[in-house]
Image (cartoon, grey):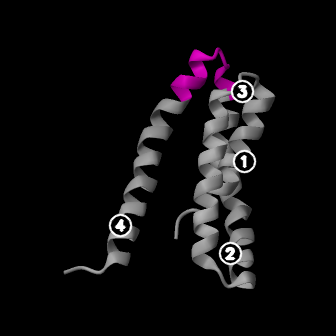
Amino acid sequence: MLALPYWRLSGYYFFYFAFIGAFSPYFGLYLQSLSFSAWDIGLLMSQMQLMRLFAPYLWGALADRLGRRLAIVRLAALLSLLGFSSFFAVRSFEAMLVAMALLAFFWSAALP
């Protein structure tokens, strides 16, 4: 019988990459339906890669300093969910840019 942490981690990876598969191809279409220009959509989608440049180092330093790596991953996953939920409440480009930056910042720490 396989250990419980194996199933937890494999489930976490499944939902992490399922989110990528569902979010990446369709979020641009959602933004287009909100009448954002191609330039705006490109800027919003680039937030994910921009945050990947520095956010993982900040999260890693925090996890190492506190010594609670699993708690940091759980917190990041929860805050990512809250950041994603904000997309349904905002409609302006500026608010969407802030929401996307927050999602990307918290989500960049979610992969164990």
Q: Earlier in the sequence, mark 3 or mark 2?
A: 2
Which residue, given by chain and number where applicable, does mark 2 sit on?
60
Q: Which of marks 3 and 1 is nearer the N terminus?
A: 3
Which residue, given by chain and number where applicable, does mark 1 sit on?
102
Kind of residue at disc 3: Val
Which residue, given by chain and number where applicable, does mark 4 sit on?
10
Say which quadrant the N terminus sits in.
bottom left
Evaluate if marks 3 and 1 touch, with contact meaning CB atoms under 8 Å apart: no
Q: Earlier in the sequence, mark 4 or mark 3?
A: 4
- Measured in 3D between alpha carbons, the distance from the residue under mark 4 to the one under mark 3, in whole angstroms, is 33 Å
Evaluate if marks 4 and 1 touch, with contact meaning CB atoms under 8 Å apart: no
- Measured in 3D between alpha carbons, the distance from the residue under mark 3 to the one under mark 2, in whole angstroms, is 30 Å
Kind of residue at disc 2: Gly
Kind of residue at disc 1: Leu
Q: In this view, does 85 lie above or below 56?
A: above
Quarter of the view holding residue 58: bottom right
